[in-house]
Structure formats: C-alpha cells, structure tokens
C-alpha cells in the first residue's frame, strides 16, 4: 500500500512575494503571492491562472459564475529580486544564527 502522507517541503516562495510566471498559459505575467500550500507545492498568485467557478444560489449568495485564481505549481514561478526587479533564484544562508533567504543575482537578503 502506498503511503498517502506527504512531507511538508521548505519553499523558496512565501506569501506577499512578487513572482514571475516562467511556464504555462500565463508565462511572463508578474503578480503577488496570495497564498502558499507547502504540502502540495503550489501557490495562488494574483491575476494568474484565472478559472471560472460556478456557484449554486443560496439564501446569502445569489450564485452565478465567479472568476478566481487557481493554484500554480511553485516550479513555474520565479521570485522577483527586490533590488534589481529581475527574476532570480533563491538561496539560503545563516545570518546571526537564523536561516534567511537571499537573492542569488544581487546577494541581497530577502525580507
């Protein structure tokens, strides 16, 4: 039997980051990360991978067709360097005993 428990992986992208989509239908689009799902290795990016969701009417909600962003795999996203504004790879290094993210392009510490 296959074990269905997935391991939570450390991702290079966090909520609030500016990212560039490097693959897929929305290739070349920049956006802000709204939510991250580490177990599934996916992230929801503002105005990227927009899908139509049909909602049934209820007493509170009139229903209808709503457009909302769907999750994108993190391998299709690249962090925008805060210093240069260009896409960059992300590394990790210890600074004052804490593990921090840094831009491989400029060497700048990210947040």
Image (cartoon, helix red, strand yellow):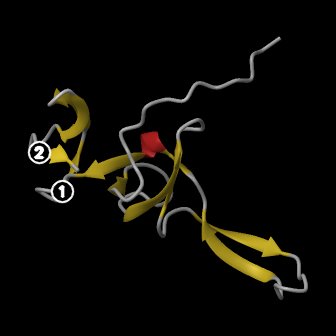
Q: Eyeballing the image, is 73 above or below 57?
A: above
Q: Label 2: how many residues lie within 10 Å, few (<14), some (14-19) or many (20+)?
A: some
Which residue is depicted at the point 60% across and 59% down? 70
Which quarter of the figure is the N terminus placed in?
top right
In the visual, does 50 lie left or right of 31? Answer: right
Residue denoted by label 2 = 108
Q: Residue furthest top?
A: 1
In the visual, does 39 lie left or right of 84? Answer: right
Question: Residue 10: where, in percent of width, then height?
Answer: 43, 31
Q: Eyeballing the image, is 78 above or below 84?
A: above
**Which element type, helix, strand or loop, lies under badge 1?**
loop
Question: Residue 110: where, in percent of width, then height?
Answer: 21, 47
Q: Residue furthest front?
A: 97
Question: Residue 28: where, in percent of width, then height?
Answer: 35, 60
Tag shown at residue 74 = none
Which residue is depicted at the point 47% across and 67% down? 46
Question: Residue 51: where, in percent of width, then height?
Answer: 65, 67
Tag shown at residue 82 = 1
**Which element type, helix, strand or loop, lies under badge 2?**
loop
Which residue is depicted at the point 88% across and 77% down? 56
In the visual, does 59 lie left or right of 7? Answer: right
Label 2 to label 1: alpha-carbon separation: 8 Å
Q: Nearer the viewer, residue 92 or 1?
A: 92
Q: Are marks 2 and 1 in contact (CB under 8 Å)?
A: yes
């Amino acid at each position: 039997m296959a074990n269905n428990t997935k391991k939570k992986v450390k991702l290079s992208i966090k909520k609030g980051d500016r990212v560039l989509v490097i693959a897929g239908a929305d290739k070349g689009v920049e956006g802000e990360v709204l939510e991250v799902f580490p177990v599934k290795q996916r992230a929801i990016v503002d105005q990227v991978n927009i899908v139509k969701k049909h909602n049934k009417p209820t007493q509170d909600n009139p229903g209808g067709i709503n457009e909302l962003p769907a999750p994108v795999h993190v391998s299709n996203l690249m962090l925008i360097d805060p210093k240069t504004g260009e896409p960059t790879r992300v590394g990790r290094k210890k600074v004052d005993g804490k593990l921090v993210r840094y831009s491989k392009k400029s060497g700048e510490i990210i947040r």
